[in-house]
Amino acid sequence: MVQNSYYSEADHGPFKTVNLGPFELEEGIILPGLNIAYAIHGSLNLKKDNAILVPTWYSGTSKIMETVFIGEGRALDPSKYCIIVVNQIGSGISSSPHNMSVPFSMSAFPKIRIGDDVRAQHILITEHLDIQELALVVGGSMGAQQTYEWAVRYPDMVKRAAPIAGYAKNTDHDYLYAQTLIEAITSDSGWANGEYSHHHEVKEGLKRHAKIWSVMGFCTEFFAQECWKTLGFSSAETFQTDFMEALFTQMDPNNLLCMAWKWQRGDVSRLTDGNLATALSRIKAKTFVMPIDTDMFFKIEDCKREQELIAGSELRPIKSLGGHLALFGFEPSYLEQIDTHLKELLSL
Amino acid sequence: MVQNSYYSEADHGPFKTVNLGPFELEEGIILPGLNIAYAIHGSLNLKKDNAILVPTWYSGTSKIMETVFIGEGRALDPSKYCIIVVNQIGSGISSSPHNMSVPFSMSAFPKIRIGDDVRAQHILITEHLDIQELALVVGGSMGAQQTYEWAVRYPDMVKRAAPIAGYAKNTDHDYLYAQTLIEAITSDSGWANGEYSHHHEVKEGLKRHAKIWSVMGFCTEFFAQECWKTLGFSSAETFQTDFMEALFTQMDPNNLLCMAWKWQRGDVSRLTDGNLATALSRIKAKTFVMPIDTDMFFKIEDCKREQELIAGSELRPIKSLGGHLALFGFEPSYLEQIDTHLKELLSL
């Protein structure tokens, strides 16, 4: 356990935390008390059929999901829906390497899989919130991995699914990309095999990690058209130092490594002996698969191959100059497209 | 100076080396004796108008240029043309950090710019080989940077130009990408600020560098369609370890850093007070700009913006599943397209 003021309710809240008690992970370890942090916007109706689940992406928390997805007049309108944002394990808000006590702290934090998150969320939703039906599960990137896992694992419960910029089964290319992020951190001698005493000891590794994100996370046109200007920066260099590096150097290295390991191994076909077609054929949700056209690692072609295995699904690509990190929602046109597709999906 | 048997004539030759004597670099340092290694295929005709120059790309040497570009019946046919392949400074074959003596060895090797290479090549061509006209300059990646520099710097001498998968002025995105490659190496404590005693001391950094190349150097479809099979590998993992890591861990870290620094700063507008349009308007060569459609960092859109500033030029995109490293020439269809375009260009 290390101190890190970044993971506070002031920055990421408001959120509630539920302790699910002992939780057996897919990798065989039992966590004695798994904490899941979540936020609810809006209210459940009497029929309990207006719940929407939004799982988080890599390094994101409920706060940014709220900004990007939720608002009056938007598709995820809290006056109509009960929107539950759930922070993934390792996010720094739910149980994570940096906030656990011995013997599960830091380098001893066990490996987590997407399936662990989704099973934990299922307990939260069904037992703690007493909700048996989800009108929609929608998430970007690792949130898309969780969305697919939900739709395959609990097909009768998920009525609609919108995986944005993510895969049901991760690709070799994406695995390698995440590996470069991992090694940017673990190559820092300050990481000390996960036993640093403050995340600033891994600052250089976190900066390298931020640079690789800049290269792969946006796209060439983002830089060619100087889109960082719309984010308030005066040069590509200050965008890199004052936004990307400033953002990631606040975070806990072990938390990021926990999520990256999980991201690399996201694969719904683990539920069907490795057969992806069989896994995706289980889905009963009306599904819009929404890749971002300029995304450098979750490509339309790869998403389309998965979408075609889902009965009744539609491919709904999003146009953007932001690449994968269009997810941050800095383009009004991106938000409009997301809302248009999600409103249509929710009307079906 | 460190020993490295990789940079031998056995692996990269045959080549000749010319010592150009004292050479003043753009950054102000005078190298006392600049060696340039080159290989010639075919013979100069009586009119001395059949010379073709092929500069090398990052980490490539004359050997692979020969394999990829030159052959009987191909566009660069040594029975018709006098084809001169010139190894860039820092390549390990020409003067480079690893093969220089004190006081210019290793970390003390000065910064090199694309303009230094092209001025040195100009001396080689005009004074040592007594050639005053180039029928074609063609190169990929950093070879494209040198091609543009040649066409802008010596417009009367270059009759045709074919920059493949590279920019006249490097972009912010590409600068950042090269920076991640640099930091993959310099983050290795074995690098020791460039004063390692053997390149194997930097093996982990070179492996990280190889991984980042795998992510950005190919493309998602290369992995999705398992194109590594055509290269003789049984999995994406063995392709990574036995090809990419095996390749780059043979190389000298300081050599790679020398080339990466140069790559980041390639910019023909240095010749025209920062005005790219003015620089490219100097070009008299008939120019085919040849981006690769799946290239993740030298994009068609960016290449097109430059191509449109070159009078009479044409954009000739290459279709490939290889991404940037289609340059390696492992696809027959890639080689066919290159030959088709270059034959047409040479006929103009």
Image (cartoon, coloured by chain):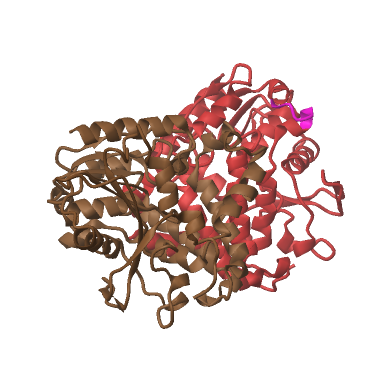
Chain colours: A brown, B red
Task: Look at the picture and state if A84 lies above or below B320.
Answer: below
Residue at image point 74% right, 23% down = B156
The residue nearer to you, when weighing B310 against A234, is A234
Q: Residue furthest bottom?
A: A103
Asked if B286 appears above or below A150 in the picture, the reply is above
Q: Left or right? Give the position of B256 relative to B208.
A: right
Q: Which residues are magenta?
A: B271-276
To which quarter of the image does residue B43 belong? top right
Residue B310 covered by magenta stretch = no
Let me know if residue B339 appears in the view. yes
Placement of B242 over or under B178, stated as above or below: below
Identify the residue at image location x=51%, y=29%.
Answer: B301
Give the camera-side residue of A134 and B138: A134
Q: Residue at 20% across / 48% down in the picture?
A: A134
Q: Is residue B19 left or right of residue A250?
A: right
Residue at x 80%, y 61% (from the top left corner): B108
Q: Residue B31 appears at what percent x and percent y?
A: 84, 53
Residue A115 shown left or right of residue B87 in the figure: left
